[in-house]
Amino acid sequence: MKRFLVLVFLVVYLWNDGMAQQMQPLKISQNQRFFQTADGKPFFWLGDTGWLLFIKCSRDEVLQYLDTRQQQGFNVVQVMVLHTLGAKNVYGSKALKEADISQPLTTPGDAFGDTTAYDFWDHVDFVVREAEKRGIYMALVPIWGSAAKEKQ
């Protein structure tokens, strides 16, 4: 079970932003039966699956989604980073150069509204920071299985 969780989910993707609340890292309990916070308190994973959140949602839609999930009591959102090797987000930014997993497509800067600066990965960073502000952990599947098989 532990190996499965480690391989499939990057459970803790935290950003230390001055405006964000301090979220404790999660770990697996000593008996390997449950998650707990760094201070040893049991963590109940109440997650929603927003698989295509990074790809299908604009910044405004992300905020609405996260606000709603926070109000509903969710503390984890499970999402795919790359659904396909040709993934691009709602703003048309591609994640990879020539669909090559070894070549993330990044740009200098991260200013939203500057199409030469705000890339796929800046949008991922935005979503993760906003989730943290709401006390929501992001469980990231790095790449969907079918996409990983494409290059074998």
Image: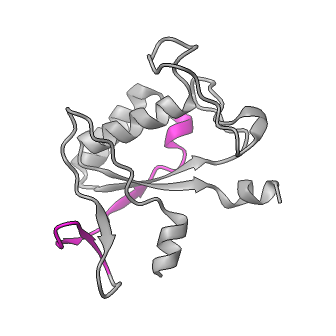
* Residue name at image x 28 percent, y 56 percent: 75
Which quadrant of the figure contains the C terminus?
bottom right
Which residue is the extreme one toward the right? 152
Q: Residue furthest bottom?
A: 31
Residue 41 sits inside the magenta stretch: yes
The segment highlighted magenta reads 34-56
Q: Residue at coordinates 30% horizontally, 64% vertically from top-left? A: 26
Q: Examine the rendered structure and indicate whether residue 117 appears above or below residue 32.
A: above
Q: Nearer the viewer, residue 113 or 97?
A: 97
Q: Nearer the viewer, residue 45 or 21?
A: 21
Q: In front here: 15 or 135?
A: 15
Q: Quadrant of residue 98?
A: top right
Give residue 70's position: percent from left, percent from top: 25, 47
From the viewer's perspective, is residue 137 above or below residue 95? Answer: below
Q: Quadrant of residue 25?
A: bottom left
Q: Is residue 125 left or right of residue 97?
A: left
Residue depicted at 59% across the width and 31% down the height: 89
Q: Picture coordinates of residue 116 (x, y %)? A: 58, 14
